Image (cartoon, coloured by chain):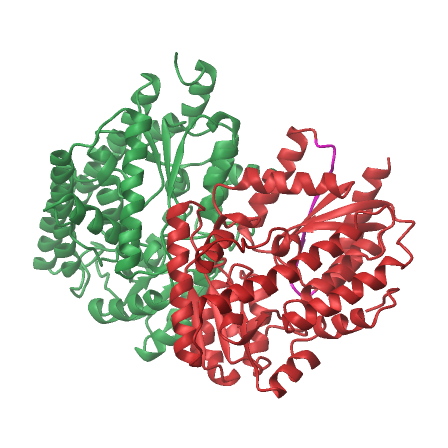
Chain colours: A red, B green
């Protein structure tokens, strides 16, 4: 990836986010550590960490086709799980000891079923589970997820032989909150008229945080933020853009937008602000209860959570205002019903509430293709803001 | 003061009344046809029409009625004497609706693109264009797919529906006792919600009565499914099967008319078996192949496909996902047992919620059980474009079939839009497969 950022920390982030296995993971493994992969940002990383694992957010980085996965998935499935499954069937996740899935969406939840049957042996994982995350966000759902987290805690304790105490969970919460805070601090820099970091570069830094030990990540993020404080800002852009959508871990997609002159200054994405905008409450006596509340209703939700569309819309509107956004791009992986309808409502609401920010729905495949079409549509979108 | 202005009310009922009138004409025509199967169809149409008329009457008289989804324990609101409709009803009547393709185009123009489930985008189109009755309150269900919660969110978002309170039950991803108990609590809360927003009170005696009659229906249904094991199968795609689902929990529930329909169904099937008749009465026709159609039938173009399959090729749809019978009878001895068993029936037994919610075990289990119980020769997974979790389970389904030494066909189509994969192409795929396997 090309970058103007002069920072060793950022170079590490480029390496970490650019592949599945990386030097940081290898170092962790060399020290006797184990890695647990997980899907979706609603699996409580804190429990994984309290069990002694390094959490790794699953991606399909490096995949170029879905030939092997196509025996198990169909062409109407989202390309994200198909690419991940293809990587799994090639044995690219041998660095994992465990895999934690969740009923995130209709496509991703089926990775569990296919993994345990067809990819487990290839990747030699020794523990797999699937969590049941409610779709609503009331107190009964908090209770349900509280039990789910405790079930996971017991399962991991049994599997690893590690006693997962409340103190260890508290420690993991604290560490993750620190990571969230430095990520938010990085976003603060993007509020400037000439932000020192682009949207694509930011995505690199956020993705890296899901693929390396947290302590090391926090240390490098602090270095990066220091390095950026004296850096030359990005100028000459045509518009300040916000991206709203789901699973986006490919900086190249953001690059295509930014190459046309739309500087991405903020987002509401899975590998973005929704990950860290709110911290887990460290004051709650029972840390598992704190986690259940956090993952059910305290953090910003995605469209799989029913009934909170007005709150999501408010989150988008507030961020657009805070970051002085000129236009919103709704990115969506093809075949995603949730984001299709969410974008439909967002477009309506932006118009209805006279927010004054235009919206462009921009579909994509997980591995970037149709660059020309994306460029043309972004160019046209930016022109509407210039006129 | 009425809930809705006359203009909004009239427009919201326009399409619903067209459908009622269409089914009324259909009923008149069916009554003229000879044969007991037509009598059964007429009874079913009467039940359907009665349900539709009740909704229309309630809407015009400003009386409470429910907008329901499917598999949300209709015994509960039926026992409160509340008329109800399903918000995703029209796509399933699609073969009867000449406007369906225009409606799909309308949905696409709104931005609800062709990769989104047609069964979900059509109701969204109807809601957004005020083409659906606006109920007093709405009951949703947040599975079997990602489309379900999105449909409910659009309901909440639409200005005409802003004052329509909605409660959606949240089925967990698991199916153990903990999950059933959680879902039972959801149903209890749903009951309170209905009471609050309709003014009707739950009457335990009435609920017991509805559940017991519903049990009676399910018991006869199970008995009927035994008859479908017979070779040749006494009925094909048109009679029994998915009709049983419709008449047990879609248009009515715990209804004496349903009991009468099921009793007649048994009598008719037994007579056919005794007379040595298969699904068709065509001279020289024989049952060449028994299939398990593992999904909803292609309602958008069912009359252009299923008769061809059965009459011309002798391929009989012995069972489908909605005819599948794994149901729990309700223990009516206490409030707790009723809610527990209603929760189990709607969470673990009911079609699609059973397979598509939760891990893929039931996909494989139901395939194997149907092959074994009904002497199935091949399994067809139609591959509806909206059933994305199933699309990610094709490898598992194929493997289940392989273990049973039974051929498996995955087509890839839209059950409601015949332009997605043309009917000729579907026929060609099916015929090529069946020929290749030596069935025709």
Q: Name the image quarter holding the C terminus of chain B.
A: bottom left
Q: Does the magenta stretch include residue B435?
A: no
Q: Name the image quarter holding the N terminus of chain B.
A: top left
- A273 is higher (above) or lower (below) than B292: above
Residue at 64% from the left image edge and 70% from the top image edge = A214
The image shows residue B255 at horizontal and vertical percentages of: 16, 37
- A305 is higher (above) or lower (below) than B325: above
Residue at 33% from the left image edge and 23% from the top image edge = B56
Residue at 59% from the left image edge and 38% from the top image edge = A345
Residue at 38% from the left image edge and 66% from the top image edge = A151
User: A176 or B262: which is nearer to us?
Assistant: A176
- B264 is higher (above) or lower (below) than A214: above
Span shown in magenta: A355-367
In the picture provided, is B162 more to the left or to the right than A220? left
Question: Can the viewer see residue A265?
Answer: yes
The quadrant where residue B382 appears: bottom left
User: B63 or B115: which is nearer to us?
Assistant: B63
The quadrant where residue B405 appears: bottom left
């Amino acid at each position: 990836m090309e970058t103007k950022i002069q920072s060793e920390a950022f170079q590490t982030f480029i390496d970490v986010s650019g592949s599945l296995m990386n030097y940081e993971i290898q170092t962790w493994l060399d020290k006797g550590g184990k890695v647990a992969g997980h899907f979706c940002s609603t699996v409580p990383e804190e429990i994984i960490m309290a069990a002694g694992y390094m959490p790794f957010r699953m991606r399909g980085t490096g995949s170029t086709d879905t030939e092997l996965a196509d025996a198990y998935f169909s062409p109407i499935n989202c390309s994200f799980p198909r690419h991940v499954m293809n990587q799994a069937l090639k044995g690219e996740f041998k660095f994992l000891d465990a895999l934690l899935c969740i009923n995130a969406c209709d496509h991703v939840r089926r990775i569990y079923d296919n993994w345990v049957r067809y990819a487990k042996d290839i990747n030699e994982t020794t523990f797999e589970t699937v969590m049941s995350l409610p779709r609503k966000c009331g107190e009964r759902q908090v209770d349900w997820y509280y039990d789910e987290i405790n079930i996971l805690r017991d399962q991991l304790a049994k599997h690893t032989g590690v006693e997962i105490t409340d103190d260890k969970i508290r420690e993991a919460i604290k560490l993750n909150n620190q990571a969230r805070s430095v990520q938010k601090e990085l976003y603060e820099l993007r509020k400037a008229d000439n932000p020192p970091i682009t949207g694509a570069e930011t995505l690199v830094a956020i993705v890296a945080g899901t693929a390396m030990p947290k302590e090391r990540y926090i240390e490098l993020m602090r270095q990066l933020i220091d390095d950026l404080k004296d850096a030359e800002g990005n100028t000459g852009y045509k518009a300040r853009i916000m991206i709203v959508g789901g699973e986006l871990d490919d900086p190249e997609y953001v690059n295509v937008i930014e190459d046309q002159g739309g500087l991405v200054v903020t987002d509401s994405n899975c590998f973005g602000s929704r990950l860290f905008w709110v911290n887990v409450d460290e004051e709650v006596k029972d840390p598992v209860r704190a986690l259940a509340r956090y993952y059910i209703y305290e953090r910003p939700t995605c469209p799989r959570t029913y009934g909170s569309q007005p709150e999501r819309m408010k989150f988008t509107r507030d961020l657009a205002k805070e970051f002085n956004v000129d236009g919103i791009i709704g990115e969506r992986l093809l075949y995603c019903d949730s984001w299709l309808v969410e974008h439909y409502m967002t477009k309506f609401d932006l118009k209805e509430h006279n927010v004054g920010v235009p919206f462009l729905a921009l579909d994509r495949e997980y591995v970037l293709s149709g660059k020309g079409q994306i460029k043309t549509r972004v160019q046209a979108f930016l022109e509407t803001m210039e006129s | 003061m009425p809930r809705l202005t006359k203009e909004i009310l009239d427009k919201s009922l326009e399409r619903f009344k067209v459908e009622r009138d269409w089914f009324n004409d259909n009923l008149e025509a069916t009554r003229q046809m000879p044969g007991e199967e037509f009598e059964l169809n007429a009874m079913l149409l009467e039940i359907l029409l009665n349900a539709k008329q009740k909704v229309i009457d309630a809407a015009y008289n400003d009386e409470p009625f429910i907008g329901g989804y499917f598999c949300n324990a209709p015994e509960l609101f039926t026992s409160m004497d509340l008329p109800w409709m399903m918000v995703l009803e029209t796509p399933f009547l699609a073969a009867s609706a000449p406007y369906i393709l225009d409606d799909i185009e309308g949905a696409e123009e709104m931005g609800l693109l062709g990769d989104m489930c047609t069964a979900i985008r059509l109701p969204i189109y109807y809601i957004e264009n005020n083409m659906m009755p606006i109920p007093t309150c709405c009951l949703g269900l947040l599975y079997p797919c990602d489309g379900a919660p999105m449909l409910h969110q659009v309901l909440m978002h639409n200005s005409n529906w802003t004052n329509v309170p909605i409660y959606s039950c949240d089925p967990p991803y698991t199916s153990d006792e903990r999950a059933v108990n959680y879902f039972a609590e959801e149903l209890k809360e749903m009951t309170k919600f209905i009471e609050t927003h309709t003014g009707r009170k739950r009457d335990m005696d009435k609920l017991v009565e509805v559940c017991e009659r519903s049990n009676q229906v399910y018991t006869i249904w199970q008995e009927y499914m035994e008859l479908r094991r017979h070779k040749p199968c006494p009925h094909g795609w048109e009679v029994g099967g998915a009709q049983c689902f419709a008449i047990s929990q879609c248009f009515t529930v715990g209804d004496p008319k349903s009991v009468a329909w099921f009793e007649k169904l048994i009598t008719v099937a037994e007579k056919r078996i005794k007379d040595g008749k298969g699904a068709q009465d065509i001279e020289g026709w024989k049952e060449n192949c028994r299939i398990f159609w593992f999904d909803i039938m292609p309602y958008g173009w069912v009359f252009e496909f299923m008769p061809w399959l059965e009459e011309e090729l002798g391929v009989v749809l012995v069972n489908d996902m909605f005819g599948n019978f794994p149901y729990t009878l309700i223990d009516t001895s206490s409030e707790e047992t009723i809610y527990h068993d209603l929760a189990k029936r709607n969470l673990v037994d009911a079609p699609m919620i059973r397979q598509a919610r939760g891990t893929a075990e039931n996909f494989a289990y139901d395939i194997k059980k149907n092959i074994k119980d009904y002497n199935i020769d091949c399994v067809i997974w139609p591959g509806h474009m909206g059933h994305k979790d199933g699309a990610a389970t094709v490898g598992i389904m194929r493997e289940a079939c392989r273990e049973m030494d039974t051929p498996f066909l995955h087509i890839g189509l839209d059950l409601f839009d015949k332009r997605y994969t043309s009917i000729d192409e579907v026929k060609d795929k099916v015929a090529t497969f069946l020929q290749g396997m030596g069935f025709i």
